[in-house]
Amino acid sequence: MYTEILLIGAGVTGCALARVLSRYDVQVTVIDRGTDVAEGASKANSGIVHAGFDAHPGTMKAKLNVEGANMYPALCKELGVPYGQPGALVIGFDEDDRKTLENLVQQGIENGVPGVRLIEREEILAMEPNTNPAVLCALYAPTSGLTSPYEMTFALADHAALNGVTFRMNEDVTNVWQDETGLWHVQATSGEYTCKVVINCAGVGSAFIHNMMSDDKREIINRRGQYYLMDRVTPLPFTMTMFQCPTKMGKGVLVSPTVHGNVLLGPSAEDIPDAMDVSTTADGLAFVLEKSKLTWPAASPRGTITNFSGIRAHEAKGDFIIGAVSGRTNAYETVGIESPGLSSAPAIAEMLGKQIAQEQGLAKKADYQPAKPLPKPFHAMNNEERAAAVAADPLYGKLVCRCEVVTEAEIRAAIRRPVGAHTIDGVKRRTRAGMGRCQGGFCSPRVAEIIAEELGIPMTEVTKCGGESRLLTGTIQEAMKEGCCHE
Ligand SMILES: Cc1cc2nc3c(=O)[nH]c(=O)nc-3n(C[C@H](O)[C@H](O)[C@H](O)COP(=O)(O)OP(=O)(O)OC[C@H]3O[C@@H](n4cnc5c(N)ncnc54)[C@H](O)[C@@H]3O)c2cc1C
């Protein structure tokens, strides 16, 4: 298959870049080995839009974090993605921590983070009374925000698709090479793609792709982070995101509300050999709980509805690598996009998209479509709005997920989006059906039924998350024929 631009990796970076490129008159195809967009780090992270004090001044991370964080409020409004700006504290317990925090405040000022300052114990406890009373001082960053990382990625992908970008999933890239005419060839699961321009946004797979394209080799360290996610019934102990002093492994364990009002504890930081190993471990979770207690002495696993992990793509040199692939023509990359990659994605996309458009001589599209944000979710509507929604579409009157108050109308709409859901997890992340206390125990069969109806496939073909993850192994009639069960 030929496409002018082939972009590998449908995470938040790839989808943000695809959306920027969709402003131009050029054919763009995005491929990913996942069964849906946002199957890598972009689905399993803390969801913090970092204010931008963590990265050393002068680095790509510092510049793009602050630029990206500034873009978030307007971008979330434009795309209809949840966003909040509760602020953050990084707390310290002794004089060594105070020195670290003073340096972070200075970094924040140099990076251009608004309002960042050091505060003392009394002010901390007045702001956040559930903080460990042993706290000494803290960095206060009023512009630290929260978002839903996968909802952002879906919205970016939808807007790109609305403007002509094609998304092809289940495409594992195993080889990339440039021929003598300068065309790029990409071997993926369904066959070979040929393109003029190739872009590598493959997260933990970005060094593997890079090393097939360039003699200047790179290494990605897979750094896993594990989490506890609490029920929304658990009272929020803090209004802000509560960090501890960073270590050489990263920003440390946080206790934070999510943008949807759950309590989140984590992440751990462990280097692992397998980039696909998103399992959680007893040791990793025990570490998270123990560290959380330093911030919130009452932290307990009660109220946990799920544990999960995500893998950071840590590049050995520590900064984002963004731009043209050295020594090659018509090849671009984003490598080592670990935290603050979610916060930086909009700025990464603007910067790299502009470079690609200039170097490739791309012209702006005449018929570029603005985003079509999703309607307000049913759970967030007041009674008058709910009555109007049901009057306009009676399927708003059919509640499918009781925990998160998600209706059949919203589930069908999620499947019909430009890059629509086709798995139970895809529906869950787009609508929150299955995100609540029962974790889909009640609504999954009905969600599966709706997916089957919408996609015109048998229920036995509906999967949780692609591949062989079917919910049903067959029909009762088939089992009876095979003598496996009796009337
Ligand atoms: C535990 C944790 C916590 C974090 N917390 C935050 C936070 O609070 N705030 C913040 O700003 N950032 C945070 N980050 C960082 C942020 O999640 C990432 O920087 C961001 O999601 C990276 O997006 P991406 O699109 O570059 O990578 P990904 O989302 O990983 O996307 C890369 C895609 O490439 C695909 N791919 C890889 N190899 C191949 C191949 N061979 N063939 C085809 N496709 C391939 C993958 O399937 C994947 O979908 C966190 C990360 C982790 C892991």
Image (cartoon, rainbow, N blue to C red):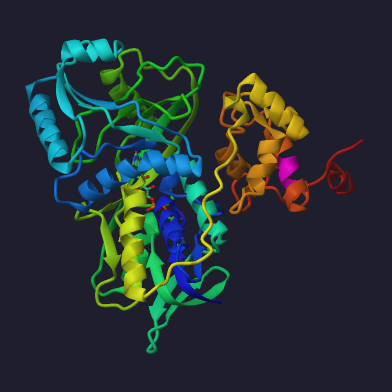
Residue at x 25% of width, y 68% of height: 217
Whole-percent x and y of residue 36?
55, 52
* Residue range (magenta): 448-452
Furthest residue toward bottom: 180
**449 is within the stretch colored magenta:** yes
Q: Nearer the viewer, residue 403 or 67?
A: 67
- Does residue 382 appear left or right of residue 412 in this picture? left
- Would residue 412 appear left or right of 481 to someone viewing this image? left
The picture places residue 319, in percent across and down from the top left corner, at 22, 53
Q: Is residue 4 above or below residue 371?
A: below
Quadrant where the C terminus is found in the figure: top right
Q: Is residue 180 visible?
A: yes
Q: Does 26 appear above or below 132?
A: below
Residue at the right extreme of this rendering: 487
Provide residue 5's location: percent of width, then percent of height: 45, 71
Q: Quadrant of residue 436?
A: top right
Say if residue 272 shows up in the picture.
no
Quarter of the rendering occupied by the N terminus? bottom right
Q: Is residue 41 left or right of residue 1?
A: left
Observer-nearest of 218 and 37: 37
Q: Nearer the viewer, residue 260 or 233?
A: 260
Q: Position of residue 267 (x, y in %)?
A: 34, 34
Residue shown at the point (46%, 57%) measured from the top left: 19
Tell me which residue sits at (43%, 63%) in the image. 21
User: What secondary structure prevails in the magenta region?
Assistant: helix
Name, please, the residue furthest toward the front: 366
Q: Is residue 400 magenta?
A: no
